[in-house]
Image (cartoon, rainbow, N blue to C red):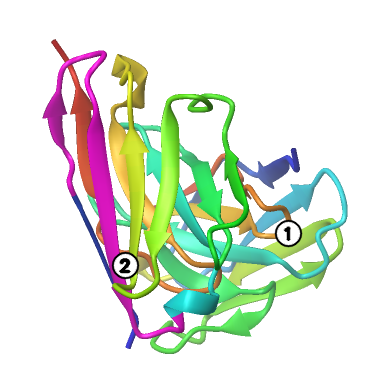
Amino acid sequence: EIVLTQSPEFQSVAPKEKVTITCRASQSIGRSLHWYQQKPDQSPKLLIKYASQSISGVPSRFSGSGSGTDFTLTINSLEAEDAATYYCHQSSSLLWTFGQGTKVEIK
Amino acid sequence: QVQVVESGGGVVQPGRSLRLSCEASGFTFSTSALHWVRQAPGKGLECVAMISFDGSNKKFADSVKGRFSISRDNSKNTLYLQMNSLRTEDTAMYYCANSGYPWGQGTLVTVSS
């Protein structure tokens, strides 16, 4: 099983600051890594697919990078509406796995 | 526009069965591998089952192996999850998902006596 380790697990950030979340895979997964945002009582929302591909309708302040085992989600100029839990997810193996989540709080 | 609608959830007693359905549109259903992902209350995400585009290959998480089965009807763009011998720990929101596409709202399964 491919294990995804996210860090940090919690981050408190002031508006307009930059947020960086990392996701490390236990083995190489190429670029088969996706990022989701989940707010309370909502389903996960796709933010970035295949490591760095943007999604229509997602604000441009969200970006992704990385390949192999190390990946990063960056939120430039954090806004109040970005308070949420963020998950990385790999689709390299037949049975997907997910990171444990990073909760982002607005200071 | 991708649309995914899960249904079939509800409250069920331990040991009973439930069948979930997922109707999807907006992508080529018949060529897509599909997955069921669940999220227990207050917990993270767990992929419990996958099925290949033609149904020939299926995988299950250890937590549901032998109790859950997955199937699909490509003529109806519908994915299924048959859940037998349900346990309280199967209580979760269940989502069907396709790699790189938006998810639906999910269907809630509550296993309780």
Residue A81 got which mark? Answer: 2
User: Residue, x 83% and y 43% (percent of image)?
Assistant: A26
Residue B55 got which mark? Answer: none
Determine whether A48 is above or below A106 in the image: below
**Decide: marks 1, 2 in contact (CB < 8 A)?**
no
Q: Determine whether, in the image, residue B106 is placed left or right of residue B65.
A: left
| Sequence order check, earlier mark of 1 and 2 | 2
Location of residue B14 in the rendering, given as x and y in whole percent from the top left corner? 23, 13
Q: What residue type is labelled 1?
A: Ser
* Secondary element at image label 2: helix
Magenta part of the chain = B8-28
Q: Which amino acid does label 2 sit on?
A: Glu
Residue A92 got which mark? Answer: 1
* Secondary element at image label 1: loop
Residue B26 covered by magenta stretch: yes
Label 2 Cα neighbours within 10 Å, binned few <14 / some 14-19 / many ≥20: few
- Residue at mark 2: chain: A
Location of residue A106 in the rendering, given as x and y in whole percent from the top left corner? 39, 55
**Which of the 4 image quarters holds residue B38?**
top left
Residue B69 covered by magenta stretch: no
Viewer-proximal residue, B16 or A3? B16
Which quarter shows the C terminus of chain B? top left
Q: Nearer the viewer, mark 1 or mark 2?
A: 1
Location of residue B50 in the rendering, given as x and y in whole percent from the top left corner? 54, 51
Location of residue A102 in the rendering, given as x and y in whole percent from the top left corner? 53, 46
User: Residue, x 25% and y 59% (percent of image)?
Assistant: B105
Asked if one can make out residue A77 in the rendered structure from this viewpoint, the answer is: no
Q: Determine whether, in the image, residue A81 is placed left or right of residue A75.
A: left
**Which of the 4 image quarters holds residue A88?**
bottom right
Q: Determine whether, in the image, residue B69 is placed left or right of residue A74.
A: left
- Residue at mark 1: chain: A
